[in-house]
Image (tube, rainbow, N blue to C red):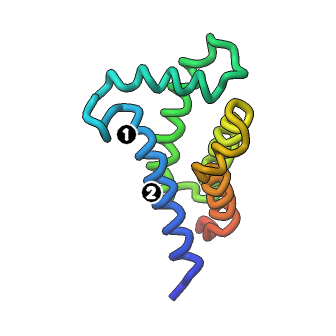
Amino acid sequence: MNWNRIACLYVRIALAAAFLSAVAGRFGIWNGEGLRHFSTFFQRTAEVNSFMPSWTIHPLAYLATGAEIFFAFALLAGIWPRWIALGAALLLAMFATAMAISFGIKEPLDYSVYSASAAAFLLAMRSPPRKR
């Protein structure tokens, strides 16, 4: 058994599932509210990014959603494994840091955002090199 490959696959699937679950939540899929639930995501984005100007909140919400969808499917497909994992690690680190700035360090630690970022970073370092 190649434990490195199994671990990398496990991390890819776990990160993709976490991204897709977050997106599903903001589109109201988990609670059956549908798209009207996305407006509450704007409020949450404003809370997490309380240090950002108000005009950046809607673009940040859309960019975060697009990035999470992109990274989820790229992780599942296994394309550009090192670059995608590194991008996911940076996105998660930025999110965790924004949470820490706005709410204190306890929140990103409680939600394991730094742990997920670290897992993505390890994935970037451990992913099998792409064959040419």
Residue 106 in percent (x, y) is at: 68, 45
Corner quadrant of residue 28 = top left
Dot 1 amino acid type = Ala
Task: Return the residue found at the far bottom.
Answer: 1
Q: Can residue 132 be spotted in the picture?
A: no
Question: Residue 7's x, y, as percent?
Answer: 55, 73
Which residue position holds label 2? 76
Q: Amino acid at mark 2?
A: Leu
Q: Quadrant of the C terminus?
A: bottom right
Q: Secondary structure at mark 1?
A: helix
Neighbor class of circle 1 (other Cα within 10 Å; few <14, some 14-19, many 20+) is some
Residue highlighted by disc 1: 24
- Give the left or right position of residue 54, taking residue 2 as reference: right
**Nearer the N terminus, badge 2 or badge 1?**
1
x and y percentages locating residue 88 in the rendered image = 61, 48
Bin the neighbour count of mark 2 within 10 Å (Cα to Cα): few under 14, some 14-19, many 20 and up: some
CA separation in Å, label 2 and label 1: 16 Å
Q: Which residue is pictured at 67% across the width and 51% down the height?
A: 114
Residue projecting furthest to the left: 32
Residue 74, placed above or below residue 63 = below
Give residue 15's mark: none
Near-viewer residue (108 or 83): 108
**Residue 9 image position (x, y, % from top left):** 50, 68
Q: Are marks 2 and 1 in contact (CB under 8 Å)?
A: no
Residue at the spot x=56%, y=26% of the render?
Answer: 45
Placement of 20 over or under 66, stated as above or below = below
Q: Nearer the viewer, residue 101 or 17?
A: 101
Q: Is residue 58 visible?
A: yes
| Residue ID at (44%, 56%) | 77
> Residue placed farthest to the top in the image?
55
Q: Secondary structure at mark 2?
A: helix
35 over 80 or under it: above or below: above
